[in-house]
Image (cartoon, rainbow, N blue to C red):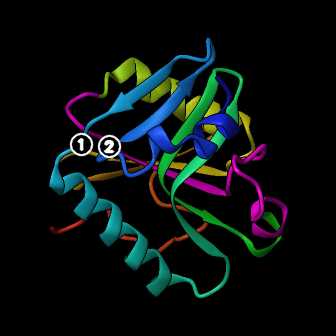
Amino acid sequence: MNWQQICNSPQFRDLPFKIELADSGKIVMSPVKVIHSVFQGEIAATLRTHRKDGAILSECAIETGKGVKVADVAWASKATYQAIRDRAVCQTAPDLCIEVLSDSNTPEEIEEKKLLYLEQGASEVWLCNQEGEIEYFDKRGAMANSFLFPDFQKKMDC
């Protein structure tokens, strides 16, 4: 099964959880708690207060070398957004990909997703843990602050 088939299939509509597609074509489900959704919404809203340009995306599907991964929140510059806006799945990652961690995530899975997003063209990847603390990364590794959103806080209060 590919991502377009999943998007077109009525059996996958209105699911109460996020799904991804492994490189084997296997569907991977990720159940999350309410606080996960709250962090997603608060991060997206706060991104908009820091920058009016570009597009903020939630649950953004990105084609990677290991299947389709879904960033919880993403931000795309105007140029990137124009390149991806009409696609079912992004061939190029948005400039910023954000993962909100949940109980079902393993450290290995998150590290892999971080690297895959960067390989697909993301300039930065942020990780928000279950306490709302945010870590910033680029291809060189951990960063003290985001380059794209230099004044973004290091902790979300939800």
Question: In the rendered structure, are the residues bearing label 2 and label 1 in contact, judged by CB atoms less than 8 Å apart?
Answer: yes
Mark 2, mark 1: which one is toward the viewer? 2
Confirm whether residue 132 shows in the render.
yes
Mark 2 Cα-neighbour bin, 10 Å: few <14, some 14–19, many ≥20: few
- Location of residue 12 with respect to 131 vertically, above or below: above
Residue under label 2, please give it.
17
Between marks 2 and 1, how big is the CA–CA gap? 7 Å
Give percent across and percent down for residue 100.
Answer: 34, 48
Magenta-drawn stretch, dominant element (helix, strand or loop) = loop
Name the kind of residue labelled 1 in the image: Val
Q: Is residue 30 left or right of residue 2?
A: left
Answer with the quarter of the image where residue 23 lies.
top right
Give percent across and percent down for residue 67.
Answer: 63, 25
In the image shown, does 148 or 97 lie closer to the viewer?
97
Residue closest to the far front? 10
Residue under label 1, please give it.
32
- Location of residue 49 with respect to 122 vertically, above or below: below
- Location of residue 97 with respect to 155 vertically, above or below: above
Residue closest to the far top? 24
